[in-house]
Image (spheres, rainbow, N blue to C red):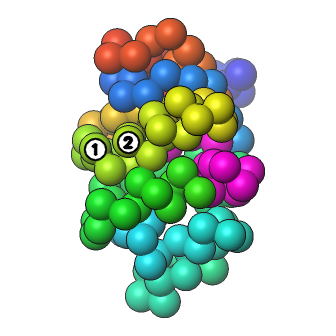
Amino acid sequence: MPAAGSEQAVLTGRVLVAGRGGGPLLRLEAPISFWGGVDAGTGRIIDPRHPQHGASVTAQVLALPRSIGSSSGSSILLELLARGRGPAAIVLGEADQILTLGAVVAREMGHAAMPVVLLEPPLLQRLPTPLHIDAEGRQGRSIALS
C-alpha cells in the first residue's frame, strides 16, 4: 500500500504466458542471452560482460529490455524451471518468442507456471519491488502491474 499522500501508478502489460509469480525485482540494465549468459544449474548470470554478472535470477521477478542470442535460450529457461532455479516471473520490454517458448514448454512438462508479461520499455524503470503478478487465465489479455 502506498504511503499517505503518495500515489502508485498502475502499469498495464500484455500477458504472453499466464501464471502467478512474485518476489523481489531484478531489473536488468542490459539485454542478456540465456544461452551462455545464465548458468542453468545455479541461476547466476555468468556473462562477464553483463553489468549484473554474478546476480541470480532464481525466485526473482526478472525485468529485461529484451533477450539476445541463441534460440537455445528457451532450453536454458526450461532447465532453470525444472531445477527450481528459474525466475518467479519475467517482464519483457520487447516480445520474445524464445523465452516465451521456454516458459510454455516448462508448463506443459509440469514445471513451474511462470508468467511472462510484455510491458512498454520505458515503463520497466517504474516497476515496484517486490512485484507480484497474477496472470492466471489471462493469456493474450491486458493485466495491471502494481
**Numbered mark located on residue 117 in the image:** none
Residue at screen point 52% across, 19% down? 135
Horizontal side, residue 125 vs residue 56: left or right: left
Horizontal side, residue 136 vs residue 124: left or right: right
Mark 2 belongs to which amino acid?
Leu
Question: Does residue 51 appear in this view?
Answer: no
Residue at screen point 60% across, 67% down? 40
Tags 2 and 1 in contact by the CB under 8 Å rule? yes
In terms of depth relative to the viewer, which is nearer, 7 or 107? 107
Mark 1 belongs to which amino acid?
Gln
**Numbered mark located on residue 97 in the image:** 1
In terms of depth relative to the viewer, which is nearer, 113 or 127? 113
Residue 93 x, y percent position in the rendering: 31, 45
In terms of depth relative to the viewer, which is nearer, 90 or 35? 35
Location of the N terminus by quadrant is: top right
Highlighted range, magenta:
80-90
Location of the C terminus by quadrant is: top right
Asked where in the image residue 30 lies, by quadrant, the reply is bottom left
Pointer 1: residues within 10 angstroms few (<14), some, or many (20+)?
Answer: few
Residue at screen point 44% across, 78% down? 36
Residue 64 x, y percent position in the rendering: 41, 54
Which residue position holds label 2? Answer: 101
* Residue 85 is covered by the magenta coloring: yes
Label 1: element kind: helix
